[in-house]
Amino acid sequence: MATTLDRFFDEGADVFWFTSREGESLFASKQSNEDSVMPSANATLASSLWKLGWAFDNSMWRDLAQRMTAKYLLGTSQLDRATRWIRAWRDMSGVYGQVVIAAPSQEEAKAELQNWWTEARPGTWIGCVTSESTNIPTWMEGKRPAATDPVQWYVCVEGACGMPCKSADEAWIQFKSLTR
């Protein structure tokens, strides 16, 4: 995301362009704001900034996502062509939390993910940390599982983290209690 911001983001207009700042100078530059058959590239990037901002604890990305989304929605007269923007705004309007499965192996983490996806669980970013993981959320430091540890579920909602859980259902209950 940092590379995308460096190469394609226009700070003055709060939009991403299809052509890089480092590319050749063109007569006209293109950007995508309105949804049509294809979702808006800028709305998709705003949504990604929001989610990755939580995943990597980067408040600048979250703030940028909110600014881009508000600027577009408040400035458009065609909300019928803004479904991706509206979905991004909906995600940003509620409480957002991270759920992490700490498992001894990727196979066990994948098996546990199946339990998470048995129902819709909005407002969450799901991730997995194994004994081999190289990139983990900062709040998971010191909680990396050993190869012999049991699977644990961790829930963190906007800085408030709960106790480890043993199942997807327990993690979902904890998420809902942290969001009240």
Image (tube, helix red, strand yellow):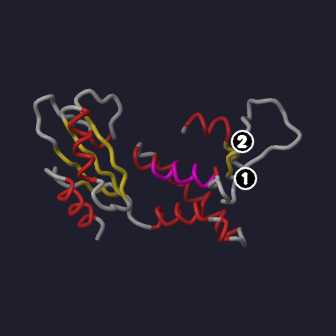
Give the secondary structure at mark 1.
Answer: loop
Residues rendered magenta in the picture: 42-51
Q: CA distance from mark 2 to mark 1?
A: 14 Å
Residue nearest the observer in this picture, 66 or 116: 116
Q: Amino acid at mark 2?
A: Phe
Q: Residue at x 21, y 63 (%)?
A: 173
Disc on res. 13:
1
Looking at the image, is mark 2 or mark 1 earlier in the sequence? 1
Choose top left, top right, bottom left or bottom right for residue 171: bottom left
Choose top left, top right, bottom left or bottom right for residue 122: bottom left
Predominant SS of the magenta segment: helix
> Is 96 left, or right, of 175 in this rendering?
right
Q: Amino acid at mark 1?
A: Ala
- Percent x, y for residue 158? 35, 57
In the rendered image, residue 44 lying in the magenta stretch gets the answer yes
> Is 65 left, or right, of 40 in this rendering?
left
Q: Mark 2 sits on what residue? A: 18
As drawn, the residue found furthest toward the right would be 27
> Is 139 left, or right, of 33 in this rendering?
left
> Is 143 left, or right, of 8 in this rendering?
left
| Residue 111 versus residue 132 in the image, above or below | below
In the rendered image, residue 52 lying in the magenta stretch gets the answer no
